[in-house]
């Protein structure tokens, strides 16, 4: 089954170019994420994410460590973007997100990378921590469409999205994949620097689901549209797992595809902040799975 990605219709209608232009203009007072720093990135000013006007990436290629519905047999075409709009003190990719290990690329180069991943047979384009580069991504998509880009676009983010960003992405993104980290904004502020995280994440989940619905897969089991939520279990229940999963089941959809992740390990500055200085226990993970079943979630990765 061949499904035409959402963004191609917007491109054909000229709407994708209009969105890219509006997003670029909004960098004069940036509100691309829920921090809404309002700095003028066009003049080189930098906000919380420390991003400027040039898109920066760390690496790209077929990735086989993602969810099965994204990986299939040929991999998820993953592009790791440099920086992040969160500063998680336990980040397992801190060299990319905090230390900004990467390099700038032109819009033409970014478009060519997406085409290259498609030509290698990847099932989708998976943009990792893309939010702060939303304007540049839209502009690169506008260049990639006439070159034949036609596989689903995955927005692999931390859940701290602004209303402006999600409005600009409506009809562009095929698969939203937020990592919903916390259900307590005070804990989130302490561990990520993001104020109002849970409120922003709830609003984002509602809007993402409104746009793309529950995750849909083709006859080969490969996702082509919908919402896929990740939730990383943290030691000592710092993530507030039950509240996160209950919200998803009751206010988004019990059919939401949820990956409850067990791979937490102390990284970056986690060793300075107990209980983040230890791995989760098997009991903590099994309790998270039991909660998911108890609140009525039926599609667990």
Image (tube, rainbow, N blue to C red):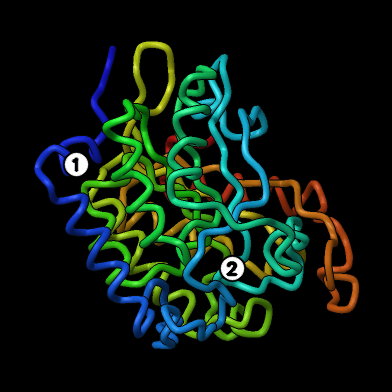
* In the foreground, 60 or 43: 43
Residue 186 visible, this angle: yes
Q: Tell me what residue is drawn at x 35 percent, y 29 percent.
A: 149
Q: Quadrant of residue 11?
A: top left
Give residue 240's mark: 2
Give residue 282's mark: none
Q: Where is residue 9 in the image (x, y as percent from the top left)?
A: 16, 37
* Quadrant occupied by the C terminus: top right
Q: In this view, does 81 lie above or below 84?
A: above
Distance from disc 1 to disc 2, alpha carbons, whole Å, reads: 40 Å
Q: Tell me what residue is drawn at x 62 percent, y 59 percent.
A: 82
Give residue 11's mark: 1
Q: Position of residue 229 (x, y in %)?
A: 47, 48
**Helix, strand, or loop for circle 1?**
helix
Q: Where is residue 130 in the image (x, y as percent from the top left)?
A: 49, 57
Q: Tell me what residue is drawn at x 44 percent, y 45 percent.
A: 108
* In the foreground, 235 or 21: 21
Q: In which quarter of the image is residue 87?
A: bottom right
Q: In this view, does 145 lie above or below 47?
A: above
* Quadrant occupied by the N terminus: top left
Q: How many residues crowd mark 2 within 10 Å: few (<14), some (14–19), many (20+)?
A: some
Q: Tell me what residue is drawn at x 26 percent, y 43 percent.
A: 213
Q: Which callout, 1 or 2, points at the residue further toward the start of the chain?
A: 1
Q: In this view, does 69 lie above or below 251?
A: above
Of all residues, the one furthest to the left in this rendering is 13
Residue 293 visible, this angle: no
């Amino acid at each position: 089954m061949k499904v035409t990605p959402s963004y191609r219709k917007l491109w054909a209608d000229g709407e994708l170019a209009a969105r890219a232009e509006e997003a670029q203009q909004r960098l004069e007072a940036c509100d691309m994420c829920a921090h809404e720093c309002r700095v003028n990135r066009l003049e080189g000013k930098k906000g919380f994410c420390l991003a400027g006007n040039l898109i920066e990436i760390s690496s790209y290629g077929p990735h086989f460590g993602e969810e099965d519905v994204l990986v299939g047999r040929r991999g998820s075409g993953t592009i790791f973007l440099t920086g992040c709009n969160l500063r998680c003190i336990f980040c397992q990719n801190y060299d990319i997100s905090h230390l900004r290990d990467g390099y700038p690329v032109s819009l033409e180069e970014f478009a060519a990378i997406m085409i290259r991943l498609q030509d290698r047979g990847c099932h989708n384009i998976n943009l990792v921590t893309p939010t702060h580069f939303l304007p540049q991504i839209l502009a690169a998509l506008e260049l990639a469409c006439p070159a034949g880009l036609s596989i689903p676009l995955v927005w692999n983010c931390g859940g701290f999205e602004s209303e402006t960003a999600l409005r600009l992405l409506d009809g562009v993104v095929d698969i939203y994949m937020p990592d919903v980290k916390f259900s307590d904004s005070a804990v989130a502020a302490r561990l990520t620097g993001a104020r109002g995280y849970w409120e922003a994440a709830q609003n984002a989940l509602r809007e993402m689901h409104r746009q793309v619905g529950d995750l849909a897969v083709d006859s080969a089991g490969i996702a082509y549209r919908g919402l896929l939520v990740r939730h990383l279990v943290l030691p000592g229940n710092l993530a507030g797992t039950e509240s996160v999963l209950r919200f998803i089941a009751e206010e988004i959809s019990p059919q939401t595809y949820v990956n409850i992740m067990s791979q937490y390990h102390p990284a970056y500055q986690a060793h300075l902040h107990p209980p983040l200085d230890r791995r989760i226990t098997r009991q903590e993970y099994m309790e998270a799975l039991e909660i998911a079943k108890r609140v009525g979630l039926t599609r667990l990765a």
